[in-house]
Image: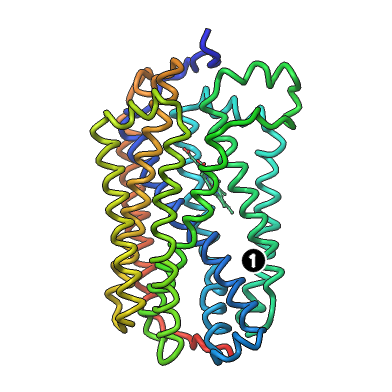
Amino acid sequence: MNGFPAVDPIPLPAPVWLFKGLHILTLGLHFVTVEMLLGGLLVAIFLNLLAQTRQGRSNGADPANAAAALARRLPVVMTFVINLGVPPLLFAQVLYGRAIYTSSVLIGVYWIGVVFLLMACYWLLYRFSARAAEGRSGWWLGLGALVLAGVIARIYSTNMTLMLRPEVWNAMYSASGGGLHLPPADPTLTPRWLFMLLGGLSFAGLWMIWLSGGKNMHGSLQTYLVTKGGLLAAVMAVPQVLLANWVVKTQAASVQTALAGHAVYSVAAYVWIGAYGLVLLIGLWALVGKPKSILPGALSLATAVVAMLAMTIYRDGLRDLTLLGKGYDVWQRTVVTNWSVVVIFLVVLVIGLVAIGWLISVMMRAKPVSEKVV
Ligand code: HEM
């Protein structure tokens, strides 16, 4: 008896590798946007607050304008957080249903609560964004949104770690089936949550570098964004690597050994570390060189996506190897591929991607609005 509920008699309608590939791709992109949201919000709150102080005003209008540039984009980022969160949720349920459904039911009240927390967070984000875009103070609204986003992240981390602990499920359910019990202490939870929260700061720095290369960025605001973004990215790159080390070190020794001995996950780890080395270098370049082209922004974007995809592959290995040690092998699922449905799915996916590409190209060609709010 390994604690996992009985196997779902319905076989998988497509190969495991296809679900896994799509899961990692969409989850990696979800994580990019989550980091932009968490980090961008924190920086926008800080700059909005700074703009009200005497020290901030000594920098002219730059803190207020930089806060507005970030804040007015945050509701859009949130739409991507949500829309890029739904596909991996579906793929995770298909691949790990017996684990993730169980953990979701055990913390059911908190899990369902995410919907309401998300609505409140979104509302506060709109309020903060509107005030910042008018050059007004609204940091407390942003702070409310940030706290709620942090709680949502905590609930996600709680569920994603609880799904790896079949040994505690029975006792939790016996104690209460009401969905209000949180899992017993887990040393992996807090490092994992902090890794995602703090990761936002280096991503916010990269995002500011990206924004500085926009058509409508000129003069002191452009310099402010590129140098402050560079500083943030460079300063936060090293703690992020140390945090990653903490996340790994809190895993069971057998999982650490299995991860280190697996070629794919080892390569993913090195790619991630290499990407963070690049984050440091891009940050320093932006800080010292104050470049005015789109190049540092483009490099920042590419590095952020590569880092997140590598992290997501490693994280996937962490989950698979932990579950394997407890008797759940994700690759041993019964698969009866329904190729006609798979082909239709892939065709629709390509059409969707082309449509999104076209929408982005329209957006890039649109007449830029002024970034100056004060
Ligand atoms: C403010 C909104 C959100 C924040 C801050 C957030 C944050 C996070 C974080 C921190 C994790 C990683 C947890 C861990 O492994 O330790 C995560 C995972 C995840 N999130 Fe989000 N999330 C948000 C909204 C959403 C929404 C709306 C959805 C879907 C409807 C979603 C879907 C997922 C999925 C599916 C995973 C993990 C999947 C897996 O491990 O296979 N997220 N999210």
Q: How many marks?
A: 1
Residue 331 placement: quadrant: top left
x, y percentage for residue 284? 33, 71
Image coordinates for residue 209, horizontal then vertical, percent: 39, 74
Residue type at the position of mark 1: Leu
Quarter of the image that includes the C terminus: bottom right
* Residue 344 left/right relative to 250: left
Q: Element under label 1? A: helix
Whole-percent x and y of residue 67?
Answer: 56, 77
Quadrant hosting residue 238: bottom left
Is 307 left, or right, of 158 in this rendering? left
> Residue 268 versus residue 25: which sits nearer the camera?
268
| 334 or 53, nearer to the observer | 53
Q: Is residue 264 above or below residue 178?
A: below
Give neighbour class at mark 1: few <14, some 14-19, many 20+ (Cα, 10 Å).
many
Q: Which residue is mark 1?
A: 125
Q: Is residue 43 above or below residue 82?
A: below
Q: Is residue 123 above or below residue 14?
A: below
Q: With respect to residue 153, does 146 lie above or below?
A: below
Q: How is the image coloured?
A: rainbow
Q: Position of residue 124 (x, y in %)?
A: 69, 65
Identified at 35% across, 69% down, the residue is 283
Label 1 residue near ligand 1, CB within 8 Å: no
